[in-house]
Amino acid sequence: MSTVSRRSSQTLVNEQENIAHLPNTGDIYESIVGRGNAIGGRGNINFIYNYASSVAQSAITLEDEFAVLCKGIALKALQTQESGTSSSRKKENAELQQILLEYLEIWAATPVGRYRFLWVHGFQDQAIEHMIDKALWSNCRPEFSRYHCSHNLSNPQTFIATLAFQLVVVFPATREHILDAISQNRKILAYPLEDQAQALIITPLRRAFEDSSDSSSSRWTIFVSGIDRCHISLQWQLLDVMHWISCQKLPSIIISFVVSSLSNSDDIREGLRVGESSLEIDFQHLEAHLAVKQSLQGEFAAFCESSPTDLPPDWPSNSICNELVARTFGQPIYAQTVCRFLRSTGNPTERLDQLKTTGALGGEILSPSENLDTLYTALLSTVDKENAADLLRLLGILLVPYHEKGYKDPTDAFAVIQFKAIRTPAYLEKLFNWKHGFVRRLLANQQHFLDVRGDFEEILFYDSNIRDYFFTKSRSNSFYIDKSKIYADLAENCVHRLSAHSLEYYQSMSLIQRALSLRLQLSSDFQLFFMWNINLFLSEATPHRSLCLAIERCRITKVHEARPYPDTVNHIWPAFLLAIRKLASNYSPLQDLYKEKVREYEGILKDKLKVYFDHKSLKSFIIAMSVQWIALDESTAGMFQISPNEAKEERALGFDILQSGAYPEFMPFIHDLLNNGWGDYAVDDNQYADVALYLFKNVFKRQRAISSASWLRYLSFPAYASSGDAVEKLFPLLLSRCSTRHTELLQFIKSKISVLRHANSRPFLDAVEIYVQRCTFEVNRSSDIWRPI
């Protein structure tokens, strides 16, 4: 504590009570204080002079300046307000009042850094606020000062003078510097509030503490009550100057403010900068906080009875208990986490000391989330350094979001769940090839964070928001978990599991591990887990050498030949390749690797495409679907004229997509393969024209089977009919790729143009017209070229 002298607590209480009850009819005490005589004004001013003389250490020549200061104070702002509360109301609020007072005491006693304002609001009526005011004033520490805003406060100029007057009481060494400032400028109280604060508060404090040889810090807390009782313009003036005062850097002294109001208006919230430099307490929420305190006290009592070590019945001390309660405000999980930590292995007293030495106790009272962050950091600091990296890796795997369960068909929301990849010790040990018991051993001393039960039971965190702590570097600092590295870790292990031909990988395993890994690879659960998550894993991963090496060693063709999983071609490999492509867009070394993997996959696609190119109907279908996917139904299926035998062959040897409603994930690769300009399955503009002609003929075959009116309705493409997509989307794109020298297609369109013009689809009609114009232009251009000179 600083050597700057302060008066004793009891003396201050007695003297301040005497001042508070001086007669006064307004906010400004209008009198002139002379050398012990009342020259004018109202009330017993001799007492003010005598009181000022009792705390003064300066020369008698400065007393006139002190009189100027006394004239500027607002005595009513120092008065204890009468609550007028009934005895029943007092009893109802006694416990809540005690909770609030304990919080204020702890907040004022602990170090302060970021938060120099505490805003208390939500009182049911003004009487409760007066009770808090009186209790705080009668039980407060010597470093407390006060200023009560009243309804008739019309002059904010009294604010600084009143604080300066109390500053003389709290820190008498500032008196001579305050009077010196008044002596130099006797009109200082008419200046703007910041200028007054600089001259009468900041400069005197700086000079007084500069003269002190003690390097310890002092705290001056100012209680400003009823801030919402004065006009909004005065509120802002007071709040602005309070912020200005709190931001001044002073040697060995910190100034903080407690501000109370009935309402929680946005104007006050903005003026106090809540969340930036102010903490907030809602009186209405104290009942829940009282329940937390009672629960915490009950936990400690039960703990003392059941603890194997000898603990005193009043363990821990009231100050520790009150501080824990204060830090729990707004975050009940805080107290629960502390209790679980104290119940864990080890001496509870030593555990409590660990919280003190690691900064969880004894430091600044922060916001609820920041208090919890400080606790988590303190608890993690107790982890052995040799296990810290493994623990953070495991916690990251447990916390990163991914699909833990899903359906075989992602588009079928009503399908039966096909896989469950719940984060159990057994599943994680299989996925990462960890030894049996590794997960439970690593988490054995982290029971205050999470609940670990059996090998096949899900690991659950007590705090559902703890991932925000670990994944935000500004909150967790040295315990920050980089999600991108965790996703890269998951992606690498998934690729290893999928690849059955990674020799170096298998050589590092024991026989039991190989058997477990093989069983996991062959399980349908893992295939679906991979399919649902690999895109997420790779898209969020940080690319590194080991991940690239795992991708390189995963030979798609060999894995498919060794174990052709049912969903690899249609789902797993497309998801894998699309994820690699996304990752390669931000990591150039992977671009060549992506092209290599696509070539491997195309080898599998070519084997599947053979059945389509052996049948005209299936060939037309796969080419058309690569241009524009449409779901087949009774009307659209007629355009392709696929026979039952061909459909059966497609299911057995092809992609089995005739009945698929969703766009197949592999179709972009089919599109690229058909349009790469070379190879057995390259499609040119003449083949696109063949497909268009085939579809047109099948459509008009359907026309002959139905009436003309029905045909026109078919071409009118009602919104509910899937055939609308077939004609409105497929034909325009298909015609744009057709050769203009395909005379058979052109002649067919011209022969049916009178019917086609009745179609109620502007995109379709425009596409037909544009194609005819292109063909006409090509014919004219060719005739010009070959016209004889």
Image: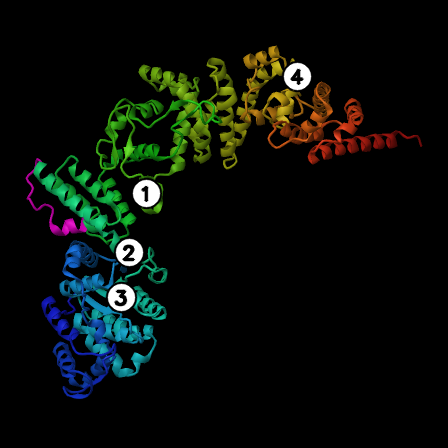
Label 2–label 3 contact, CB within 8 A: no
Q: CA distance from mark 4 to mark 1?
A: 60 Å
Q: Residues within 10 Å of mark 4 (few under 14, many from 20)?
A: some
Which of the image's four quarters has the N terminus?
bottom left
Question: Total label count?
Answer: 4
**Residue holding disc 3:** 226
Q: What residue is shown with label 2?
A: 280
The residue tagged 4 is 641
Q: Is residue 134 left or right of residue 547?
A: left
Using residue 21 as the reference point, say whether residue 620 is left or right of it: right
- The furthest residue to the top: 645
Front one among 262 and 445: 262
**Helix, strand, or loop for circle 1?**
helix
Query: Of residues 603 and 145, which is closer to you in this image?
Result: 145
Q: Position of residue 135 (x, y in %)?
A: 16, 62
Q: Say if the magenta span includes residue 323.
A: yes
Counting residues from the N terminus, which is met first, the one under dot 4 or under dot 1?
1
> 331 or 188: nearer the eye?
331
Query: Which residues are drawn in magenta?
Result: 307-324
Q: Residue at x 48, y 15 (%)?
A: 564
Residue type beneath disc 2: Glu
Quick one: 227 or 220, which is closer to the camera? 227
Name the chief secondary structure element in magenta.
loop
Confirm whether the magenta stretch covers residue 119: no
Going by the numbered disc 1, the residue's amino acid type is: Tyr
Nearer the observer, disc 4 or disc 1?
4
Q: Label 1: which residue?
A: 469
Residue depicted at x 9% and y 40%: 304
Measured in 3D between alpha carbons, the distance from the residue under mark 2 to the one under mark 4, in whole angstroms, is 73 Å
* Proximity of marks 4 and 1: CB atoms separated by less than 8 Å: no
**Disc nearer the start of the sequence (3/1):** 3
Of the residues under marks 3 and 4, which one precedes in the sequence?
Answer: 3
